[in-house]
Amino acid sequence: MAESKGEHKLVKQVHPSRPDWDYYLLEPGIDAVEELLKPQTPETGCEKPCTTIIKLLPKTNVAGHTGVGYQMINIDGFRMINAYVISDRLSSTTQRGFTLELSFSLNPFVAGVGVVGESSFFFNFDSYFEPGTLSHRLAECQTSDLTTSGGLPRLGGVDLTHILRTPVMGPYVRASVFNQDSVARNVEVSAYLLT
């Protein structure tokens, strides 16, 4: 099933971490896909860390209990990614926000095949090691819409924003957002890339 959403087309997919959710990929035109697959190269000769801001998911309206993702984007050349989930504000403690999942891949999207080797699950030996354990559990590169104390980040204001900071774990990245509420809301994902 495909439906039009402005200049993008929504294509129904199954998301591996939430197979029981309605999930759609925003598919831009072929020219836009080619542009997204070009490397985001940092400027040469920066005196301080090189940075750039890119759009991982254009602003779109997401129905309640539905997920939306975007195409794989080439971010090779950067070491850290700070992904900003920016959504409509919440006005009540009974409302919920968006969760974000980043997935990385060594390979780009290929028409008729998809993305080979895409994953949001990882284990980092540099930052975590439990002596005496031979098998370590994987972490998932995702956020919750709730704080560690269980509440919402903030009510009111201009918008509701949270950030997922992670090392770049592949030359290609995809952002997927999931609306935890039953009401449709606008959301976009922008990233601040850093060498």
Image (tube, rainbow, N blue to C red):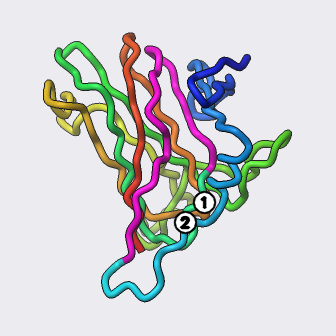
Side (left or right) of 42 relative to 143: right
Q: Is residue 42 left or right of residue 34?
A: left
- In this orientation, which residue lies closer to the viewer: 91 or 14? 91
What amino acid is found at the position of numbered circle 2 in the picture?
Gln
Circles 1 and 2, Cβ within 8 Å, touching? The answer is yes
Count neighbours of disc 2 (C-alpha within 10 A) and say few if under 14, some if 14 to 19, many if 20 or more. some
Q: Which residues are magenta?
A: 50-72
Taking the image as shown, residue 135 lies to the left or right of residue 35, namely: left
Which residue type carries mark 1? Answer: Asn
> Which of the two labelled residues, at mark 1 and mark 2, occupies the earlier sequence position?
2
Residue 102: image location, x then y, percent:
50, 47
Is residue 141 inside the magenta stretch?
no
Q: Which residue has dot 2 on it?
A: 40
List the residue tagged with mark 1: 74
Q: CA distance from mark 1 to mark 2?
A: 6 Å
Residue at x-position 61% and y-position 32%: 26
In reply to whether residue 62 is colored magenta, the answer given is: yes
Above or below 55: residue 90: above
Which label belongs to residue 119?
none
The quadrant of the picture occupied by the C terminus is bottom left
